[in-house]
Image (spheres, rainbow, N blue to C red):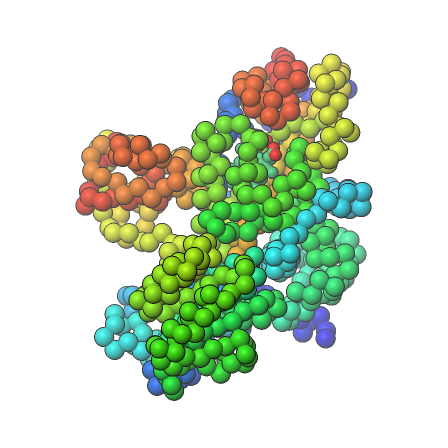
Amino acid sequence: MNTVLNDTVRDTDVLPERIKHFPFPFSGDIYRYSANVEPSRKIITTEAGAWGGRLVHIDEHYLAELKDRDEVLERDPSRLQVLPHMRPAVWDAISTLLPALVEEYPDTLSFAREGNSCRWRNSLQDLDVEFTIGDDTSLPMGPLRFLGSQIQDDLVFLDHRQDALWLDAGVVTFAADWSVGFDVGMKFMEVHHPVPRVKEEKIASRAEQFLMRLQPGEQYRRTNWTLTIDRRLDTSTETYPDWAHDRITIADDPALPDRLHLRVEVQHMIRLPHSGAVLFMVRSYLLPLSDIARVPVWRENMGRVLAELPDDMAEYKGIIHYAKAASDWLLAN
Amino acid sequence: MTATALQTKFHPVLEGTLQLEVTNVSAQTDSITSITFGDPLGELLPSYVPGSHLVVQYGTGANAYSLTGAGNAPREYAISVLRVEDGAGGSLAMHALSVGDRVQVSRPRSAFAPAATAKHHLLIAAGIGITPVLSHARYAAEWGASASLIYVHRPGTGAHVQDARDLLGSGLTECTDRGSFQEVLTRKLTTQRLGTHLYVCGPADFMDSVLEQARDLGWPKGLLHSEAFSAAALDDGQPFAVNLARSGITVEVPAGVSLLETLENAGLSIPNMCRKGICGECAVPVLRGVPQHRDLYLTDQEKADNTTMMCCVSRSLDPELELDL
Ligand code: HEM
Ligand code: FES
């Protein structure tokens, strides 16, 4: 293993793209939950580069991640849920996100719409499809699965009724230890029930108030993070037996710096313009500690955050068994 | 159908307001005129949620008008305006518009949305109150949802009567006097199937009366919807002044401009993130005066203490505040 732990790596030009665009989430040595929402598309510069200029981001993992999602859905169709009243919201997301994608990648994608007839071309996938908004049969795999096959983000749809938001649809193949099949039909506050501190600190209720006041056209985002062993996006509750055991053994694994990844979710929240549903998009980025360590400030920040993180948060995030090993490695030297 | 014929671009949404062109003006009745606005370049306008309104600027004022379309990737925004001779002037200004005029409008704002889970939509409108309800009826037709409408209008003076007939067919009940409306209303309120949502728009006393009768007949609050213009928006607020004790300067905060923006313009750097009153980053210490707290961050106790305010959304109840900045 040859990891650069050299404080003189300052010239970000030598860093690979995956590090330069990584949304490093820590701005200091202490991390606590907060209502960390901000307007979307604002570019954030980091020690290594920048991220955040786009609502939807396509990167070098595009094809691999979409293949991964497709396989997960083949194995376990319950990762896609649409309560019947959310059909308009799904079509609304298609009519909103495809043109937004084209705005960001005009050279590789194109979308044209005449009335409800649409044509979508995606040269990254060698795809040319025509479909009709509102007609589920015009997309053989179904509208939500289709949308999920075009962008790397997981998608969650919330209906606003009775002064609450209800998680009533979604395609979520890359959940960080939760399950859309379990959460579908729940209220926003119920969804956040397992999270420590957020009730006492009123973070979830404030977030819900904020989301209920979102007007169409407004776009906000936040980041969330955890640690994941290996480049595994599917860490859903359903596949727990496949990945949970690694959490016990990783601390003593000499390959920890390459196997252990900082997992950052860039979450976008938008009010869909026609259905009025709230769309929650979760884009997950994984970067191994060995890459984090190539940016000296990141190495130190993350090492200190992990060393300081209170047990209840570490327990909830499922990192309590190895957070210290990770922190020790990051802070060594 | 060729690809180029399908090529469309979306209207760039510039900081929430759009400059549109009047594309059509037509009289609905003697006192109600329909006006449509389009993008000067003919591009698609942002979609909207049924029941949304548009804030249209006129001279120094601005008025909210309900959009009458379904809101699905529209080429035009359509409103219908009742002329009010002794009003604030908005309706007269709208009636004076002609094709080709440019107007500044807000993005559509949603404050009267249909319930996605409704088994049936019972729409009730009086007079010009037909406008948002027509939008609901169109949306129901778009998605094959079940809807019916009771429309109260005086004979010969109802707007969009033909539209309503075409859309709803036998689902439309027209009433032309109070007595027959009361009869229909009582019958409808007592015979709806489970899961029906009620939407009402019209004069304030009309809405109050319908809602009260529905509640008296046992309709739960969650099934009742009434048009409330701009309830979803934070209003511009009153102008006030802030005296910055440590900097030794006083700056004016105009209506429609936040305290945070004002402080930034004055050269101060205030930490901030959401600019929406939820993240808690932009707290500023208050030395004197009573802030008008409009944030979601401070607790009720903290708000009552009046020693801290979130300057991105909160304003002042007093003409002047003193801040420890
Ligand atoms: C818009 C829709 C949102 C949805 C659908 C959503 C959903 C979720 C879900 C499913 C979890 C995992 C819960 C579990 O362990 O079972 C979670 C965790 C969490 N959410 Fe949300 N969330 C949303 C927005 C927000 C917002 C706006 C905030 C804060 C401002 C927030 C704060 C949190 C926090 C702090 C956690 C714990 C994360 C961790 O430590 O890994 N969420 N959320
Ligand atoms: S900037 Fe977030 S509360 Fe003011």
- Asked if residue A118 is positioned above or below residue B159 in the image, the reply reads above
Task: Specify the quadrant of the image occupied by residue B307.
Answer: top left
Foreground pick, B156 / A316: B156
Residue A145, position as x, y percentages in the image: 72, 52
- Asked if residue A102 is positioned above or below residue B65 in the image, the reply reads above
Foreground pick, A20 / A111: A111
> Which residue is depicted at the point 51% across and 51% down?
A160
The quadrant the N terminus of chain B occupies is bottom right
Count every numbered label the image shows and give the total: 0
Foreground pick, A211 / A164: A164
Residue B246, position as x, y percentages in the image: 23, 31
Foreground pick, A167 / A269: A167
> Which residue is depicted at the point 24% across and 50% down?
B239
Whether residue B300 sits left or right of residue B191 in the image: it is: left
Residue A169, position as x, y percentages in the image: 63, 49
Residue A5 visible within the image: yes
- Asked if residue B250 is positioned above or below residue A113 in the image, the reply reads above
Whether residue A62 sits left or right of residue B112 in the image: it is: right
Whether residue A135 sits left or right of residue B14 in the image: it is: right
Residue B93 visible within the image: no
> Which residue is depicted at the point 37% across and 56% down?
B231
The quadrant the C terminus of chain B occupies is top left
Residue A148, position as x, y percentages in the image: 70, 50
> Which residue is depicted at the point 46% across and 63% down?
B198
